[in-house]
Amino acid sequence: MKIDIYPHIMPVKYKESLYKKAKKDFYLKKVNDALPTLWNLDIRFRIMDNYEGIRQVLTLASPPVEEVAGPKDAVELSKIANDQMAEMVMKYPNKFLAGVACLPMNNIDGALKEVERAIEELNFKGVQIFTPINDKPIDRPEFFSLYEKMAQYDLPIWIHPKRGPDIPDYRTEDHSMYWIFSMFGWPYETTAAMTRLVFSGILEKFPNLKFITHHCGGMVPYFEQRVIGGQDYAETLLRATYTRSLNKPLIEYFHMFYGDTALYGGTASLMCGYNFFGADHLLFGTDMPYDSEGGNRYVRQTIDAIEKMQISYSDKKNIFEDNAKRLLRL
């Protein structure tokens, strides 16, 4: 079995409700409209049928509900999305193994109630949050109650990076050029979120809290030694105090995260993630369907890249299947 823990979907009823509530010009609308695989299950299933043993854990497509709707409407949209994903899992168990809850993060009380409903009533296997959260860092105290609840459930939080073209690459410009905000901005947002979670002591306070990071942990695996060296320099020469509240070596907290394989192919990149996270903290994820073939390309290239990794069969089986089963209690 190949359990894709990070494909995206936009159920039809949710899509209709979202478009009624959202601003007409939200930046991902054109992208989503160009990808019928997001809502057309016939197209999705035809692609999935190309790959033996593939199953999906459903995560809702962008945009975050809190970005396009007020606190009350965001709760309503989350419920619609989660109910529809739950229906899909029940109706197509040979395609979809589980759902990941959408949360209204501009309404934390509503979000906590939806966590309970999604996990206890809909049998979801975790939650997805975006970072930054309405332009707020992920380590704000207002979000701690969510982390405490997910630690109690012992189910993971999927972190999805978010950055729009309105964030320029240079201060002398007013927007990002050449899709830089997505290609490089999103891995940076993942990296920044991981770093804030580490230094804020959230992983110290909730040691069994589990985060699945998109795009294989962003920049962290590649820059492991820069993280270590940079902090040594800051603390030794600049007398920085960033790590004083942490009881373990800094890099050990980064190793607590999980990474997916959504690097769109590239065995060398995956080996970097494997060497950092280890075989037990790397999970098969494709980012379907955000590619030029409506999802087929990223699935094909990701599977091919994993198969070419110079690692044992048991490690590949961990990545494709066993880690997801264990982490999500499937």
Image: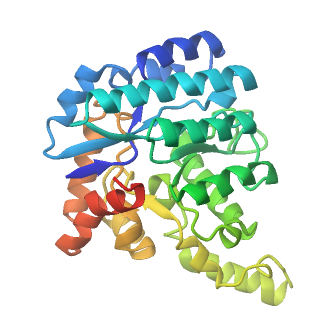
Q: Position of residue 157 (x, y in %)?
A: 55, 52
Camera-side residue of 66 and 309:
66
Residue drawn at 35 percent across, 64 percent down: 270
Q: Where is residue 131 in the image (x, y as percent from the top left)?
A: 64, 46
The answer to whether residue 145 is visible is: yes
Q: Position of residue 56 (x, y in %)?
A: 31, 41
The answer to whether residue 180 is visible is: no
Residue drawn at 53 percent across, 31 percent down: 62
> Which quarter of the figure has residue 130?
top right
Q: Position of residue 20 (x, y in %)?
A: 60, 9
140 on left or right of 6: right
93 on left or right of 193: left
> Which quarter of the figure has residue 87?
top left
Q: Which residue lies furthest to the right in this view?
A: 239
Q: Residue furthest bottom?
A: 236
Camera-side residue of 28 and 47:
47
> Which quarter of the figure has residue 291?
top left
Residue drawn at 40 percent across, 20 percent down: 34
**What colour scheme has been applied to the protein in the rendered image?**
rainbow
Camera-side residue of 134 and 119:
119
Number of on-image labels: 0
Name above or below for residue 327 compared with residue 65.
Answer: below
221 on left or right of 92: right
Name above or below for residue 161 compared with residue 154.
Answer: above
Residue drawn at 73 percent across, 39 percent down: 108
